Image (tube, grey):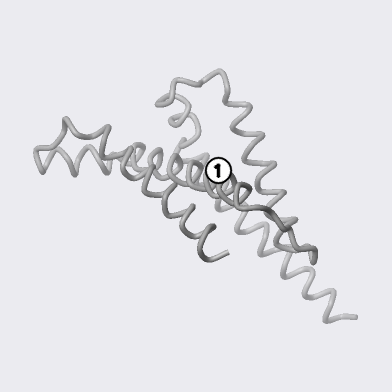
């Protein structure tokens, strides 16, 4: 019984640490406000926040449930697309906040290609997510 209680405390503490780090990353780097500014969807910021919270709760449920979630090929495509879009936009916003791409492209004298460079990362992430979900599921 003491072992189970200790496992619960360690698991809960680890979850709080990881969740706190994720929230700190998004908050301190102002990724979400910058993402809404880049995409010109500032009025939808509450939707973004709610989506992240619901997604985190749903992913936590899927991680700890013993039930298998069986879905079709179309479901895998949609699920992988959501993963790719989220990760791609998060990476693009993080890179934009940190000015990684502008500095890199300015030094290579490719500043006019910044928009296409960021979109290549976004679509690459979508393609990678779809590849993983369709072929390694």
Q: Is residue 6 above or below residue 136?
A: below
- Quarter the C terminus occupies: bottom right
Relative image position of residue 33 (x, y in whole percent) = 48, 29
Q: Which residue is the site of mark 1?
A: 82
Q: Residue at x 19, y 44 (%)?
A: 104
Residue furthest to the top: 43
9 or 89: nearer the viewer: 89
Relative image position of residue 126 (x, y in whole percent) = 44, 47
Q: Is residue 103 above or below residue 130?
A: above
Q: Residue at x 34, y 45 (%)?
A: 121
Q: Secondary structure at mark 1?
A: helix
- Callout 1: few (<14), some (14-19), or many (20+) C-alpha neighbours within 10 Å? some
Residue furthest to the front: 73
Q: Residue at x 75, y 55 (%)?
A: 61
Relative image position of residue 87 (x, y in whole percent) = 47, 46
Image quadrant in which you'd find residue 123: top left
Q: Is residue 15 above or below residue 5?
A: above
- Quarter the N terminus occupies: bottom right
52 or 97: nearer the viewer: 52
Relative image position of residue 102 (x, y in whole percent) = 22, 37
């Amino acid at each position: 019984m003491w072992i189970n209680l200790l496992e619960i405390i360690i698991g809960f503490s680890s979850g709080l640490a990881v969740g706190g780090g994720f929230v700190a990353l998004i908050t301190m780097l102002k990724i979400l406000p910058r993402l809404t500014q880049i995409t010109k969807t500032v009025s939808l910021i509450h939707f973004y926040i709610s989506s992240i919270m619901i997604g985190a709760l749903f992913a936590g449920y899927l991680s700890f449930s013993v039930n298998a979630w069986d879905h079709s090929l179309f479901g895998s495509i949609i699920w992988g697309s959501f993963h790719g879009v989220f990760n791609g936009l998060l990476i693009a916003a993080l890179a934009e906040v940190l000015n990684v791409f502008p500095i890199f492209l300015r030094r290579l004298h490719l500043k006019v290609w910044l928009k296409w460079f960021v979109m290549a990362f976004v679509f690459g992430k979508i393609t990678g997510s779809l590849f993983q979900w369709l072929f390694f599921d």
